[in-house]
Image: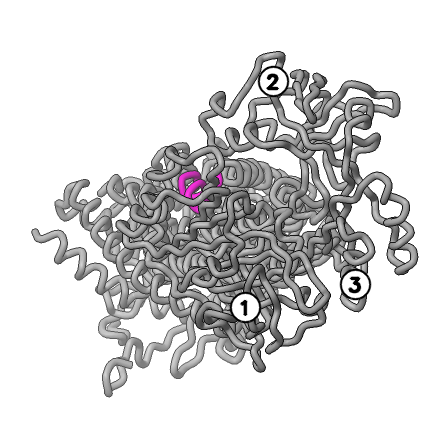
């Protein structure tokens, strides 16, 4: 017997009879939603990555205070990567009598490798090249300070240049202290002629590299170990802590959305597989009777499942590709963002996940068919052979766990959500069972059809509990999508309120504290909180001297080799969070508070003593607290804060951050003129960029959750379908015994009302719980559930399940009972 | 309908059964016995013709009206038992009483279960009962409402000879005790002979 051919024939017959449709639909939806989420997320991630790359102008950047060894460029070029260099230094730019300290950046042709520079040379457009020789591009700050216009000449060093264009949007600006000044961009070939390249000039070199991601990664591993102490290598992830957090949050969010879809798909498939097995018990018994061996029966269905899997993966992939394309087209911001094409990886991932779901949720139920007793032909009432429940659930859980970890992309998130979910499923399933039995036990208080409905539900206790749990999952996704998401996003976006500081002001001397405060009052701006800063180098931990060589990690080495910005204060900044230890009280002395990330990098523990070298003298103090710092708060943050007694006698400069409204931009220029030594850093552009990414993520999450909603509806459909044969049979018997259609309808509606109400209640509980977990552990924001989640959950659950149930069962009261009973 | 020509299942079947009588409908497979029973019980609709049950014309009633009439008057026994698999034996017997909203459903069902000798198996699910036991549960369910008429479709069709004989004895005994009218579809000539009347069908027509 050719099993494969027979399988195909059976598949065709079953297909005609509609047997495979539910399972296929569930699987196509599963793969489709995973593919949609995956492809969509991939495109957004790529776009975010590109945006982030444009901030450093490359995929990889090496910075140094000395010229690079030519070997670096050679190594990069050998890997087929693009390389350009820029040299940056501070210099005076003059126009007539007026001068302004500026940051001069000399760039090579090809710059920038990533991202775009927008210039205004009469009309605003993306720069296609670098400044022509003899010309420079300057930013608006320089034009304001020197009162220059495009076309005017300015002097830099020994040469004069024509300002050919105004830079409207720049890249490659880090919030380092070097970017305080206006920026002027020139052609690197002109640099020598300015005469500014002399011994002792403060040049900073940047080697920018871009190209194939794998080659960039390999180059990084190749060059990193050989970097000298003053060379620093960074890609987008090390370059910008605030962009990095935004990116990671995006990935968490998208991963989570994909997870919800996967769980729901699994639930739908489990329901569909159960129905399939129940409907095929007879056929299998007959085949066994006719001489088929267990193995043959197994392979017969296995082939069908594999064929089904392949078909579903193809259809689901297509569906996913089409929907994500539609999705991108339907969101204006994305349509205009010209998102990169998705890679093929998410499709493969979705396909593999589809097969894993098939294995986890359909394979073991299928295995039961193999063990059908041929005796069933004679005694139809013989139930299905039971595969150990633990085995079925165990496999499903194992598959889910693997998918979770894979799709979450983060061990912490995967385990937290999976653990919470499994515990939730068990608790909710058990609660549902308990409630249904409680209702049945107290049913004599109710009218006849309610009593009957409660008894029916309690008698089907286990399967009703499974349905409630499956429906609550769908409902939970729905509630998270609608109510909770809106709340969460609002709270999250609220982290960057409109008055988020957009200027840093640094290098204020102690005798300028009062004049600066007065200046702010005169300009009707709130007086800034000025914080002291002392530069010091960490020289010993627990009395043991350390140096760069003590750490293999290049980041740690860099931290030890340079000077830290230390500060002292009595109160902890409100935007910091105490992680462990205790903040000192007013009389506290000799204590230090360290940021938890840097403590981890440098291996500093609570209670350790640190020795710092400040301006030639040193002090030792004990670490009494660890803090968590929000790097994207756009406020002044310090790695290490000391009690005032330790640092207040050292020379300090002061700094602050403040919000400068758009209509008061000129105040900044006036501050620079009034206090020439003070540096004013504009972080507005960075904030705009972070907020832009947040908005985009918010839109993406809304769209991605739409698919979770669809899968949730598929669960409802599968749940109704799974019980339809039983309901149809029961309805026929009841009608034979004298039940009229009104009775049957109200019986069904009562059952659906109870199922829907319970599902809605659990869905609300799950959504609130999930919202809290997201708020607390992923987004790190305070959040309070809205009461409406509960009301809408319960009423909505009842309405939706009653409507869907009515649609699915309304024909049951119309078909002839004789036909249903005769079909058995 | 089958193709272009109408498929005739029953034609020119006319007979009357008086209260308390027993009638056996016999005939070969496909002769239309079960279809006739379904029509008599109002489980299906004919393309033409009339069935009067207790003086009421069945086919002037809608499906709900027929269902209520069945609930009031009729009991059923099927070849494949037709117990609800999720309900235990007692609950299956309680079902028709629950449908009418009877307050003493449990007590009456327990009595009925006792009459068929299954008190010790009352809390078992159908799948844990033998075929004979299942059919006895079905009998208890059929008689628990004290029906005026009992429709039985091949009640021994799925049972071995000895078990079948026990079930038949039980059914006839309950029938006698309650004075129920019995309409029975069977292959079994011996069983048919124990009924007061026989109606023989061949190709949808009465042959005797």
Residue located 78% across and 22% down the image:
A646
Residue A551 drawn above or below residue A162 = above
From the top left corner, tell me how far across and down residue A110 is, in percent: 40, 63
Real-space Cα separation, disc 1 to disc 2, in angstroms? 47 Å
> Disc 2 on helix, strand or loop?
strand
Residue located 50% across and 40% down the image:
A414
Q: Quadrant of the C terminus of chain A?
A: bottom left
Q: Residues within 10 Å of mark 2 (few under 14, many from 20)?
A: some
From the top left corner, tell me how far across and down residue A569 is, in percent: 81, 32
Q: Nearer the viewer, residue B24 or A541?
A: A541
Q: Which residue is mark 1?
A: A136
Real-space Cα separation, disc 2 to disc 3, in angstroms? 44 Å
In this rendering, position of residue B36 left or right of residue B60 = left
Which mark lies nearer to you, 2 or 3? Answer: 2
Q: Which residue is mark 2?
A: A540
Q: Label 1 near label 3: C-beta < 8 Å?
A: no
Of all residues, the one furthest to the top in this rendering is A543
Q: Residues within 10 Å of mark 1 (few under 14, many from 20)?
A: many
> Disc 3 on helix, strand or loop?
loop
Mark 2 or 3, nearer chain start: 2
From the top left corner, tell me how far across and down residue B59 is, in percent: 49, 78
Q: Quadrant of residue A537?
A: top right
Residue located 37% across and 37% down the image:
A395
Do the residues marked 1 and 2 share a common chain? yes
Which chain's residue wears label 1? A
Do the residues marked 2 and 3 share a common chain? yes
Q: Which residues are magenta?
A: A401-410
Q: Which residue is mark 3?
A: A661
Which chain's residue wears label 2? A
In this rendering, position of residue A249 left or right of residue A524 = left
Total number of numbered labels? 3
Which mark lies nearer to you, 1 or 2? Answer: 1
């Amino acid at each position: 017997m050719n099993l494969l051919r027979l399988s195909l024939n059976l598949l065709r017959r079953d297909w005609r009879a509609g047997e495979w449709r539910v399972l296929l639909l569930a699987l196509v939806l599963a793969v489709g939603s995973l593919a949609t989420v995956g492809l969509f997320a991939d495109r957004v991630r790529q776009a975010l990555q590109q945006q982030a790359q444009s901030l450093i102008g490359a995929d990889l950047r090496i910075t140094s205070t000395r010229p690079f060894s030519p070997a670096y460029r050679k190594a990069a070029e050998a890997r087929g990567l693009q390389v350009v260099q820029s040299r940056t230094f501070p210099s005076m730019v003059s126009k007539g009598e007026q001068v302004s300290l500026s940051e001069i950046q000399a760039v090579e042709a090809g710059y920038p490798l990533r991202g775009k520079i927008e210039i205004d040379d009469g009309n605003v457009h993306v720069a296609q090249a670098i400044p022509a020789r003899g010309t420079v591009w300057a930013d608006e700050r320089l034009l304001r300070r020197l009162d220059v216009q495009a076309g005017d000449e300015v002097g830099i060093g020994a040469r004069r240049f024509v300002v050919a264009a105004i830079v409207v949007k720049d890249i490659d600006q880090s919030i380092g202290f070097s970017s305080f000044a206006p920026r002027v961009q020139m052609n690197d070939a002109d640099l020598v002629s300015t005469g500014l390249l002399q011994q002792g000039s403060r040049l900073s070199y940047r080697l920018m590299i871009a190209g194939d991601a794998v080659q960039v990664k390999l180059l990084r591993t190749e060059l990193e170990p050989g970097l000298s102490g003053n060379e620093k290598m960074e890609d987008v992830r090390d370059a910008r802590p605030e962009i990095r957090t935004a990116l990671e949050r995006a990935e968490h969010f998208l991963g989570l959305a994909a997870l919800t879809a996967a769980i729901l798909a699994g639930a739908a498939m489990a329901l569909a597989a159960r129905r399939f097995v129940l409907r095929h018990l007879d056929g299998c018994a007959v085949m066994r009777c006719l001489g088929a061996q267990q193995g043959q029966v197994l392979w017969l269905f296995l082939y069908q499942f594999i064929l089904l899997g392949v078909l579903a993966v193809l259809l689901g992939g297509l569906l996913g590709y089409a929907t994500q394309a539609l999705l991108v087209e339907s969101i204006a911001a994305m349509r205009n963002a010209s998102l990169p094409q998705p890679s093929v990886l998410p499709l493969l991932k979705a396909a593999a996940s589809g097969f894993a779901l098939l294995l986890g949720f359909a394979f073991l139920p299928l295995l039961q068919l193999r063990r059908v007793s041929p005796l069933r032909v004679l005694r139809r009432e013989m139930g299905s052979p039971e595969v150990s429940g633990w085995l079925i659930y165990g496999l499903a859980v194992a598959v889910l766990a693997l998918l979770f970890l894979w799709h979450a992309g983060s061990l912490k998130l995967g385990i937290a959500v999976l653990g919470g979910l499994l515990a939730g499923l068990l608790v909710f399933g058990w609660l549902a069972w308990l409630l249904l039995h409680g209702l049945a036990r107290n049913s004599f208080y109710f009218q006849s059809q309610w009593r009957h409905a409660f008894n029916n539900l309690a008698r089907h206790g286990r399967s009703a509990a499974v349905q409630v749990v499956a429906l609550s999952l769908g409902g939970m996704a729905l509630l998270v999508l609608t109510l909770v998401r809106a709340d969460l996003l609002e709270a999250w976006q609220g982290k960057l309120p409109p008055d988020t500081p957009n200027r840093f002001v640094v290098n204020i001397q102690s005798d300028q504290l009062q004049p600066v405060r007065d200046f702010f009052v005169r300009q009707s701006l709130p007086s800034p909180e000025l914080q002291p800063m002392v530069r010091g180098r960490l020289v010993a931990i627990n009395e043991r001297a350390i140096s760069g060589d003590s750490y293999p990690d290049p980041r740690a080495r860099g931290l030890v080799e340079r000077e830290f910005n230390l500060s002292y204060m009595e109160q902890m900044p409100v935007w910091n969070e105490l992680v462990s230890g205790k903040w000192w009280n007013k009389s506290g002395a000799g204590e230090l508070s360290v940021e938890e990330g840097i403590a981890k990098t440098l291996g500093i523990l609570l209670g350790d003593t640190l020795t710092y070298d400040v301006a030639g003298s040193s002090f030792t103090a004990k670490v009494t607290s660890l803090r968590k710092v929000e790097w994207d708060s756009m406020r002044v943050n310090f790695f290490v804060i000391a009690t005032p007694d330790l640092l207040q006698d050292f020379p300090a400069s002061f700094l602050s951050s403040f919000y400068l409204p758009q209509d008061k931009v000129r105040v900044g220029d006036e501050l620079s003129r009034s206090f020439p030594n003070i540096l004013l850093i504009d972080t507005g552009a960075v904030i705009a960029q972070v907020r832009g990414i947040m908005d985009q993520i918010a839109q993406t999450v809304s769209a991605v959750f739409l698919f979770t909603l669809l899968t949730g509806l598929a669960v409802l459909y599968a749940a109704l379908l799974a019980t339809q044969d039983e309901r149809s049979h029961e309805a026929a018997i009841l009608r034979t015994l004298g039940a009229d259609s009104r009775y049957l309808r109200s019986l069904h509606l009562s059952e659906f009302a109870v199922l829907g109400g319970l599902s809605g209640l659990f869905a609300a509980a799950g959504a609130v719980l999930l919202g809290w977990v997201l708020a607390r552990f992923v987004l790190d924001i305070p959040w309070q559930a809205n009461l409406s989640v509960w009301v809408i959950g319960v009423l909505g659950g009842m309405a939706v399940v009653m409507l869907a149930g009515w649609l699915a069962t309304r024909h049951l009261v119309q078909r002839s009972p004789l036909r249903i009973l005769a079909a058995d | 309908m089958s193709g272009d020509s109408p498929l005739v299942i029953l034609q020119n079947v006319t007979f009357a059964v008086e209260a308390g009588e027993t009638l056996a409908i016999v005939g070969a497979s496909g002769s239309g016995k079960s279809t006739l029973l379904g029509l008599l019980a109002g489980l299906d609709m004919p393309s033409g013709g009339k069935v009067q049950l207790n003086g009421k014309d069945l086919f002037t009633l809608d499906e709900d009206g027929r269902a209520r009439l069945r609930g009031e008057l009729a009991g059923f026994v099927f070849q494949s038992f037709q117990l609800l698999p999720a309900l235990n034996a007692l609950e299956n017997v309680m079902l028709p009483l629950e449908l009418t909203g009877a307050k003493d459903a449990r007590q009456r069902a327990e009595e009925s279960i006792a009459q068929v000798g299954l008190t010790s198996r009352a809390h078992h699910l159908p799948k844990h009962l033998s075929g004979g036991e299942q059919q006895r549960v079905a009998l208890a369910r059929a008689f628990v409402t004290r029906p005026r008429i009992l429709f039985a479709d091949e009640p021994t069709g799925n049972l071995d000879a000895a078990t079948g004989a026990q079930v038949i004895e039980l059914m006839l005994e309950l029938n006698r005790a309650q004075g129920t009218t019995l309409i029975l579809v069977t292959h079994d000539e011996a069983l048919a002979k124990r009924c007061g009347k026989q109606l023989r069908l061949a190709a949808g027509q009465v042959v005797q």
